[in-house]
Amino acid sequence: MQGQILRMFIHMVRARKILLIGNPKGYTISAIAKELPGDGKIFFCAEVSSQEECDYFSDGKKINMQVGPVADTLKALHAEDEHFDMVFIDADQRNAVQYYSFVMDNHLLSMDAVICVENTLMKGQVYLENVSDENVLAVRKLNSVINSDPRVEQVILPVQSGLSLIRRSPVPPDAVVESLTQVVKDDVFWGCRQRRILERLCLDGRVAYVTGGGQGIGRAFAHALGEAGAKVAVVDLVLAKAEAVACELSLKGIKSLALAADVSKPEDVQRMVDAIVARWGTVHIACNNAGINLNSASEETSLEEWDKTFNVNLRGLFLCCQAAGRIMLNQGYGKIINTASMASLIGVHSSSVSSVVHTGVTLSCNFYIPHPQKQLAYNASKAGVVKLTQTLGTEWIDRGVKVNCISPGIVDTPLIRSRELRPLVRRWLATIPAGRLAQPTDLQAAVVYLASEASDYMTGHNLVIEGGQSLW
């Protein structure tokens, strides 16, 4: 049971680095290791260890076993500036106070870390009177030390022989702050509106939609916004694609809604917004990501191709901004994130490929391909997206609505891996300082930042994410 409980705690605090002090069971440590991410690490400090234990952990890539005096090991970890997301103490009760005090006094905990101490109830003996057992008295002292420590708060769970969970107090007590005469107690210290930076990136309670959300970057945006806490409406020209992504979100516990819409049609856009409002009451985050790209030489670009490109990439984006913007302006708050392209920033010429790709609004940034493709209509439409973003961003900010855009570089998608484009991919890679194409996941943090209160002072900005390609 102990291993299962600790695995749950690891999941809840998203621990990556764990310090184990004492002699927990081997299977417990193995269970903990399995819960850690691939780069997770367990530092196991024990006074003595049997050969069997050493053999048990010899192949554990995540487990670093330190055998010897625990006090010396802790000092060595402190000297190396190690920090841990969880500290588990299952040691001789007479030394537990010493270990707890060292961890706290020497800042071995990361900001949101948890300390778990095993056997803190001693089957209820800590509450009995006239007890002389050294171990019981040691645990009683430990509990008293923790309870009187103004830096932390604790609860004791009545599982097995008692498990104490200890964390830093969310707000340092005045007594601690006042004792540090150099501390400046302003918003930087306490956090803006007393919210720490990761809390300000949280999207809990927000309602978002993503057009072109059925594949590619739109899918990545939908997952990112949902993982940050938002309810997400996945919008696509093809309903089945939107439903597939909405199903993925639901499997992760994210509230989602699948909608079909052609963003170039005003009635579709209004129906999309109305459906979201009917379901969740409002719209806080509009991620206008739908786009298409039809490649042809400039002298051969037809009016039909020009109109089709602009109808989705610019007209459709304008319609979405306007429909969502009306709701946001009325409520005095909103975040609009438009997908532009690096193609609006650099020149293009000399193409050996002339391909026509039309997947409606599901394209979602899959064809942000600069030199040497010929894509006059696409480049011009994406430049229009940047200017529209700048205009709305300045016009609406004083009414609580911030409008920004993201300009991705060349994104690695199934189309990029096609045989026809392989020669071009090699040429593109030679022009990217990062030495690789972008992955959809490279853009996820940006959309969360622009959707959150952390970016409240940013508007009309074009956030370029292209591995440095536009600089060469």
Image (cartoon, rainbow, N blue to C red):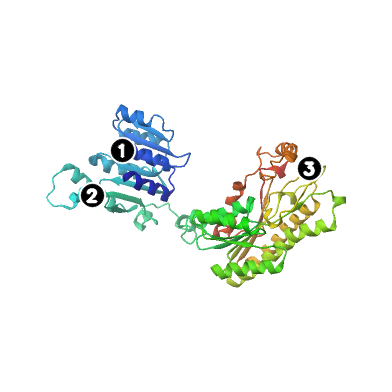
Question: How far apart are the two marked residues, 2 and 1, measured between alpha carbons?
Answer: 19 Å
Q: In which quarter of the image is the C terminus?
A: top right
SS for dot 3: loop
Left or right of 331 in this view: 426:
right
Counting every numbered tag in the picture gives 3
- Tags 2 and 1 touching, CB below 8 Å: no
Residue 395 can be seen in this image: no
The residue tagged 3 is 372
Identified by mark 1, the residue type is Lys
Task: Give the residue at x 34% y 40%.
Answer: 28
Quarter of the image holding residue 107?
Answer: top left
Question: How far apart are the two marked residues, 2 and 3, measured between alpha carbons?
Answer: 71 Å
Counting from the top left corner in percent of width and height, residue 258 is at 59, 61
Quarter of the image holding residue 283?
Answer: bottom right
Left or right of 56 in this view: 253:
right
The residue tagged 2 is 121
Counting from the top left corner in percent of width and height, residue 265 is at 72, 66
The residue tagged 1 is 25
